[in-house]
Image (spheres, helix red, strand yellow):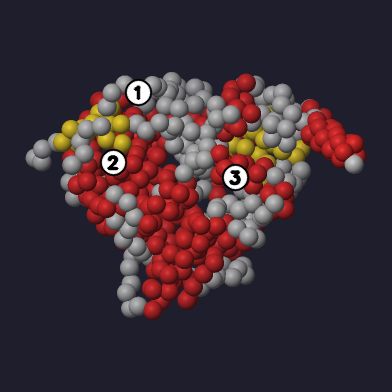
């Protein structure tokens, strides 16, 4: 019996090794240049060992093949492609979008939190985007700005009691938590004033970097069929239960009451009741919300129910909590390292003491340059993924990929390319006065699948920074090893170690 068991085990092992070896010949057989893979790990061993982030691995492969328009690599056993040429990047994200509509093919059944604009595919995504786009127009953001502004004042007040050796990321995370819970869920969680809350505790649990969560995500994104067979969930049951309950309770409460608020919950209730969200006065900056002409998909049949709203609310949390806090924290770091830029931004802010949505949006170009430059250097999402849905031949090459092939746009690598951004390691806010080539600035993606909440996030970041700079001089506390090491298991590019700051109060004039 033991001999039989050993024989079966050996046969299965040999089969898996041979199968893995065959998979690793995929790009070689197609004549596509690629770095040599390691059996079973592909090109991701450094990620597993926590040496590099996925974005850093993509950057290194990008730099290894400077003369190639496309480069293959292996995400464990999954053969994938990196586009290097900027013309091809633009084709994948914008011009030939119909070939690269989807982000993923992981299973949505059993993953209710993935019923959202991130996880949906094809025409279901198009229809959902058309339904939700009016929630992010200028008029809606203007109505939500007072809530963001008030919470930014709370942050300034809390920091007045903690001016030395401050873990600014922790406090800013409380700020973004209060903003997203108020604007997305209609809740007052008091994370800033109380230091903690059930909502904050569950959010930290959901996004805390760990090998277990990292392994689950890698399985979902690298081998979705196997993940489905093993019933692997995108989020733990505790997270699904808590946030599902919170969102359903918020929707029910708003339906039963006569209360109306300028938040996403109210707009979701309106969407459920009417089937659409009313658009106020159109502003030219709203054009990015119109994907391929939204009206083409307004009548696409898609069931709108509480499950869909739960999924979409969760993606607001996913994108609006940790991502935004990381972006603000890294901008504070760069301003602390570049005192002249900090002073220049502060002087600009002083010219507009009346904090309105329009002033934050239109009248602080240098502050916006600081934010853009920080997001270029420290993109929370340093790698964009698109799934080929129709066979595609990359122009100027002999490379044809089949449906089901994943294509990566390495945004961190593009942001670090000296041919696009001279002296990319330097913090130069002024470089944004001239703009840049198409699809070269990608912290929010680009094309029809650009982040729908881009302007909400930018408003939140700029409002927070403006309040901080108006009230404090931001300085580093102690020595800091640069560049800051990013945690490979982090959801959105958080540092391995906390960064501490000293805040010098600026007297009111």
Badges 3 and 1: C-beta atoms under 8 Å apart? no
Q: Position of residue 395 (x, y in %)?
A: 70, 35
Q: Which residue occupies the extreme left position in the image?
A: 509
Q: Position of residue 29 (x, y in %)?
A: 82, 30
Quickly name the residue at label 3: 217
Say which residue appears at 55% left-offset and 70% top-offset.
304
Q: Which mark is residue 480?
A: 1
Label 2 residue SS: helix
Q: CA distance from mark 3 to mark 1?
A: 31 Å
For marks 3 and 1, the one nearer the N-term is 3
Badges 2 and 3: C-beta atoms under 8 Å apart? no
Pick the front one: 235 or 386: 235
For marks 2 and 3, the one nearer the N-term is 3
Q: CA distance from mark 2 to mark 1?
A: 21 Å
In the picture, the quarter occupied by the N terminus is top right
User: From where the camera sits, is residue 74 visible?
Assistant: no
Q: Residue 117 is drawn in which quadrant? A: bottom right
Label 1 residue SS: loop
Quickly name the residue at label 2: 465
Say which residue appears at 60% left-offset and 58% top-offset.
111
């Amino acid at each position: 019996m033991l001999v039989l068991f050993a024989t079966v085990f050996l046969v299965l092992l040999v089969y898996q090794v041979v199968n893995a070896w065959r998979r690793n010949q995929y790009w070689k057989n197609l004549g596509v240049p690629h770095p040599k893979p390691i059996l079973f790990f592909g090109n991701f061993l450094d990620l597993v060992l926590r040496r590099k982030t996925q974005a850093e691995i993509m950057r290194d492969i990008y730099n290894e093949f400077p003369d190639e328009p496309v480069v293959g690599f292996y995400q464990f056993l999954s053969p994938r492609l990196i586009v290097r040429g900027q013309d091809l990047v633009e084709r994948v994200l914008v011009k030939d979008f119909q070939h690269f509509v989807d982000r993923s093919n992981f299973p949505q059944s059993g993953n209710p939190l993935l019923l959202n604009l991130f996880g949906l595919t094809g025409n279901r995504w198009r229809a959902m985007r058309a339904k939700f786009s009016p929630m992010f127009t200028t008029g809606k953001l203007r109505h939500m700005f007072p809530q963001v502004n008030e919470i930014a004042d709370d942050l300034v007040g809390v920091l007045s009691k903690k001016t030395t050796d401050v873990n600014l990321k922790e406090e800013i995370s409380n700020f973004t938590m209060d903003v997203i819970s108020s604007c997305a869920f209609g809740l007052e969680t008091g994370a800033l004033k109380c230091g903690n809350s059930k909502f904050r505790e569950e959010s930290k649990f959901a996004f805390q970097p760990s090998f277990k969560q990292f392994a689950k995500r890698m399985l979902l994104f690298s081998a979705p069929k196997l993940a489905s067979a093993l019933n692997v969930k995108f989020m733990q049951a505790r997270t699904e239960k808590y946030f599902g309950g919170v969102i359903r309770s918020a929707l029910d409460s708003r339906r039963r009451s006569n209360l109306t608020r300028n938040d996403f919950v109210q707009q979701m209730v309106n969407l459920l009741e009417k089937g659409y969200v009313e658009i106020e006065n159109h502003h030219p900056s709203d054009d990015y919300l119109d994907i391929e002409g939204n009206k083409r998909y307004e009548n696409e049949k898609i069931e709108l129910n509480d499950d869909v709203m739960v999924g979409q609310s969760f993606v607001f949390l996913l994108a609006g909590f940790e991502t935004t806090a990381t972006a603000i924290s890294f901008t504070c770091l760069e301003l602390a390292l570049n005192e002249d830029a900090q002073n220049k931004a502060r002087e600009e802010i002083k010219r507009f003491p009346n904090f309105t949505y329009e002033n934050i949006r239109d009248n602080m170009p240098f502050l916006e340059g600081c934010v853009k430059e920080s997001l270029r250097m420290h993109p929370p999402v340093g790698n964009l993924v698109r799934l080929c849905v129709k066979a595609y031949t990359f122009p100027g090459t002999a490379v044809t990929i089949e449906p089901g092939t994943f294509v990566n746009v390495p945004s961190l690598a593009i942001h670090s390319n000296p041919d696009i951004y001279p002296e990319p390691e330097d913090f130069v806010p002024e470089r944004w006065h001239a703009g840049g080539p198409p699809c070269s600035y990608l912290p929010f993606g680009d094309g029809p699948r650009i982040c729908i909440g881009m302007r909400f996030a930018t408003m939140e970041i700029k409002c927070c920074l403006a309040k901080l700079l108006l009230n404090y001089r931001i300085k580093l506390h102690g020595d800091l090893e640069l560049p800051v090491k990013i945690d490979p298991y982090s959801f959105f590019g958080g540092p391995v170690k906390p960064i501490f700051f000293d805040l010098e109060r600026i007297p009111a004039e």
